Amino acid sequence: MPTRTVSQQREQRKNAYNAFVAACPTNKLMDTLGDKWTGLVLSTLTEGPRRYGEISAIVAGITNKMLTQTLRTLERDGLLTRHVTAQVPVRVDYALTPLGRSLIPILHLLKDWAEENMDDVFAARAAFDSAN
C-alpha cells in the first residue's frame, strides 16, 4: 500500500462519504432522510415511544405497507428501536435512539421554515403556473 501524505489522507477521509456520489452510502442515507414519510414518522416519536397503531393514526395518509417499510428502514439505520413486550396480544413499541433524537432539531428547523415560507412558495407556484 503506497504511503500517503497527511493532506492526501485528509482528502480521502473527506471523500469517503460524499453524498453526491451515487454509490456512496451517504447518498443512500440522504435518500432515506428525504423520504416523504421518514420525517413524519420520526416526529411522532419525539414525545416518547409509540405503538404502530398510534403512529399510523398520527401520520395521515401513510399505508400499512409504507409505515412498516419506513419503520424497518429507520430501525436498520439505527434511528429508532423496536421493543417487543411478551403479552397477549404482543405489544410492540417504537422509540427514538440517541442518533434518531439528534435529527429532531433539524426536522423542526425544516418544518418551521416550511410553515414560515409557505405563502412565498404558493406565490412562486402561481407565478410559475401563469407563465407556463
Image (cartoon, rainbow, N blue to C red):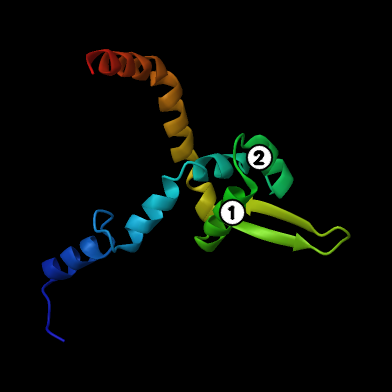
Of the 4 image quadrants, the one containing the C terminus is top left
Residue type at mark 1 is Leu
Measured from the top left, where is residue 13 in percent x and y?
23, 65
Tag shown at residue 71:
1
Q: Where does label 2 land, which residue?
A: 47
Task: Say if residue 97 shows up in the picture.
Answer: no
Q: For residue 122, what is the image quadrant?
A: top left
Q: Give the structural element (helix, strand or loop) at label 1.
A: helix
The relative height of residue 43 versus residue 114 in the rendered view (above or below) is below
Measured from the top left, where is residue 20 in percent x and y?
24, 53
Name the foreground residue: 66 vs 71: 66
State which mark lies toward you, 1 or 2: 1
Residue in the image at 40% along x and 56% along y: 29
Measured from the top left, where is residue 116 in percent x and y?
42, 19
Of the 4 image quadrants, the one containing the N terminus is bottom left
Q: For residue 129, what is the image quadrant?
A: top left
Residue type at mark 2 is Glu
